[in-house]
Amino acid sequence: MNIQKIIDRRRLDEKVVQMPWFVQQFIDYKLPDLSPSTLLEYVRDYEQFFGWLRAEGLSAAATNGQITLLDLETLHMESIVGYRLHLTTRTESTNSKITVSRKMSSLRSLFHYLGQIAEDENFYPLLKRNIMAKVEIKRIHKPKDTAAKLKGKILEEDELTEFIAYIAEGYGHDVADNKQALYAYGLNKERDACIASLILNSGLRVSEVVNLNVDDLDLTNKLIYVYRKGNNDESFKTPVYFREQSKDDLAGYMMLRQTRYQTPKREKALFVAIPNGNKEGKRMTKRAIQAMIIKYAKRFGKPYLTVHKLRHSFATDYYLQNDIYKTKEQLGHASTETTEVYAHLTDKTMSEAIERRASS
């Protein structure tokens, strides 16, 4: 059972009922082909767009759910340009080019469905005029570009083990004067170091870490069974190997998982936490793991480091010792095109290593 998929499906069901009927119809149409996580992002993109339409007076709707097809049909290109400017220049936060491209693609998918696929009772398209068909969305997410943006923002060489060691010991020295932070750290340092160690020694995605159960762990053979996406978005369990360091970290964490977190036997999750107001350990959430890594990364001197960049860090290190096909398999990529990011990253890493040897 994919826990993260269940959580995202529940959130999707909660949000989609607040959308216009034609968006609900679109989501139902896409459900067999796309994951709840992807569709949840779609709905969030539509929330933002509809909210902007209402704020700009481009719709008289009082809520997002009251947005009409006519509101979408009568949009001018000037309005779409204005929305793109809003996404890139709004004061509270700005979006990267990749994020803007993704949000516009979400809109184009909806408009295409309404104009080319969905029909009314007379077999006419639901949307008579599709403004988004005029919008060109350039492919930005190229492996070389991604590699350039990652450079300097991931862990390299000895930093992988140094970061794990920092979580296990070093952070405590930095917060020694903060009793509350020190108490929380003392409670969770073995677990936190274990999570970082597992990702940095296997390349697991954060969603895969969240979904792990105790029964998925095979310490003897240094492998862990994870849910991964196959064809037609069907999830399946597959074994993923991890390095020796993680074996020791996992063994140490498992010795205290039940007693430290008062974890009941019915809780199958591998990584647990005691939420505020609770007395028993429960499965850690994706947000909790993401926030945890960011907390340590800032103190470690790597403010750009995130949980996903730990995966990138492992992949770059792994690719230096293996070919692109083994790296693709280890990471669970659908194609080698995605894995090419690490070829671009390691080109520079290897050239720097040669320069260091030449100067030594």
Image (cartoon, grey):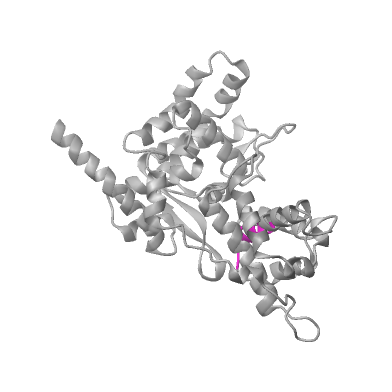
- Residue 263 image position (x, y, % from top left): 64, 37
Q: Is residue 281 toward the left or the right of residue 67 in the image?
A: left
Quarter in which the C terminus is drawn: top left
Q: Nearer the viewer, residue 83 or 280?
A: 83
Determine whether, in the image, residue 339 is placed left or right of residue 350: right
- Viewer can see residue 102: yes
Task: Inspect this view and state whether residue 6 appears.
Answer: no
Q: Is residue 349 above or below residue 49?
A: above
Q: Is residue 46 magenta?
A: no
Majority secondary structure in the magenta region? helix
Residue lying at 81% horizontally and 60% vertically, measured from the top left? 65
Q: Quadrant of the N terminus?
A: bottom right
Magenta-colored stretch includes residue 41: yes
Residue furthest to the bottom in view is 122
Where is 190 relative to 36, above or below?
above
Say which quarter of the image contains residue 16: bottom right
Q: How many numbered circles are shown? A: 0
Q: Position of residue 138 (x, y in %)?
A: 49, 63
Residue 97: image location, x then y, percent:
52, 52
Image coords of residue 172 (percent x, y): 50, 20
Q: Quadrant of residue 44?
A: bottom right
Q: Identify the magenta region.
A: 34-43
Up-down relation of residue 242 to residue 229 (above or below): above
Q: Is residue 256 above or below residue 219?
A: above
